[in-house]
Amino acid sequence: MSKQTINIGSAANDNTGDTLRVGGDKVNDNFNELYNALGTGSDLTISLSNPGSGQVLKYNGASFVAADYNQLTSALDVNSNSIISNGNGDITLDPNGTGDVRFIAGGVTSVFDGSTGEIDLPAIVKYKNEYTAIGSAPAAATYPGYFFTVDGDDNPYVNMNITAGGAGDVRAKLLTEYSGIDALTDVDTTTTAPTNNQVLKWDSTASKWLPADDQAGIASINVFQTVTGDTGSTTANTQTDTLTIAGGTNIATSVSGDTLTINFDGTVSTTWAALTDTDATGVVTGDNLFYDGTNWVRTQSPITYWTITATGSSDYTFDGPGFPTSVNDPELWVYRGFTYAFDNTSAGSGHPLRLQTTQGLSGQAYVDGQSGSGTGVLYWTVPMDAPATLYYQCTLHAAMQGTINVVGN
């Protein structure tokens, strides 16, 4: 209803205004609307008695009275404004019972757990715990577990309770990659500085690790571990083990001071004949050395060594000087005064080799200047009067034969 105003006319008693009844009715209507809007229709539900600065009208279940605004009934939007306090007053967030305090920013929720007291900050936490002096840091007993650094001090600290030695609540230094081992309370490398190759050894008198020479265990160090010879080996099992270096045949050993000398005290062969793999029987001036497969033996002239094998019963095959590849029944050229070896060991008794003056199985044998055997190694020093043409022949197979041309006339 719109507010009703009593018409009082243009002048007193000009009979143009509202009658008393009409005026009274308007007054009643206006008051009824006020009592309905601000009360129950018959009683007002608003009390303005004793209001305090900053209070609001707050419904107490029966009426609106002056009171502090201490409870939100919906989400608070600060609309880019700040929540502040005056007169150095605190701003306290106090959930009821075990309620949590939650901070949500950037999609990350950080929780102050009301039931455990734990603070869960899942995002990166940046803070600065550096003080200008160690005395400015929180007390160790009051803030145990507190980590901090001191400007100009190379050691970080943590407040903790140390039971060792009854230290109690202390600000313990922490070691870093820039710390020295001397920072440990049971190590002293300052009183006596270490020298090269020393180690830290426990000194029970000082109750500290101190620099010292490493001589522990010297009494039980083995001089050698294992020595292995051409045959056999030995391993040291005590410090007093002695390694004996014994001379063998014609070998003598001696020790003088720190020097071990190994001497040959046998007799060195000074002649060719004294060697074990030589045969000097009948050696004369001008002889040559020739190895016969077992020993070095004499020969009176340069020697050519041919190895002979058999191809079935049809051919002799020659290998050796003058034959870059194997040749079947080759024509041979020999020099008077030179020695030739026919090694028929492979063919042997199955294909005996014989030198002849005529061809064929029934040819005349020629034996001058020969030694050895036609079934083994036949040595032939060509005589100066040997015929110009000779033949070699298998005495069992006619096809295995060839011509020998003697040159050097």
Image (tube, grey):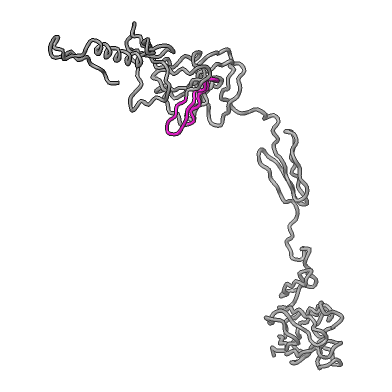
Q: Horizontally, is 290 left or right of 24 in the view?
A: right
**In the image, what residue occupies the spot 66% across and 41% down?**
259
Residue 272 seen by the camera = yes
For residue 272: magenta? no
Count of labels shown? 0
The location of residue 301, given as percent across then percent down, is 72, 78
The location of residue 47, given as percent across then percent down, is 35, 9
Taking 247 as reference, is 271 above or below it? below
Residues rendered magenta in the picture:
102-122
Taking 26 as reference, is 274 above or below it? below
The location of residue 32, given as percent across then percent down, is 33, 14
Q: Horizontally, is 136 left or right of 99 in the view?
A: left
Q: Which of 315 and 122 is in front in this view?
A: 122
Taking 15 as reference, is 305 above or below it? below
Residue 191 seen by the camera = no
Q: Horizontally, is 56 left or right of 235 in the view?
A: left
Q: Nearer the viewer, residue 253 or 43?
A: 43
Query: Residue 64 is drawn in which quadrant?
Result: top left
**In the image, what residue occupies the spot 69% across and 79% down?**
321
Q: Quadrant of the C terminus?
A: bottom right
Q: In which quarter of the image is the N terminus?
A: top left
Q: Which residue appears farthest toward the front when viewing the image?
A: 15
Q: Which of 124 and 165 is in front in this view?
A: 124
Q: Which of 299 and 260 is in front in this view?
A: 260
Query: Residue 129 is drawn in which quadrant?
Result: top left
Q: Horizontally, is 357 left or right of 261 in the view?
A: right
The location of residue 200, given as percent across then percent down, is 58, 26
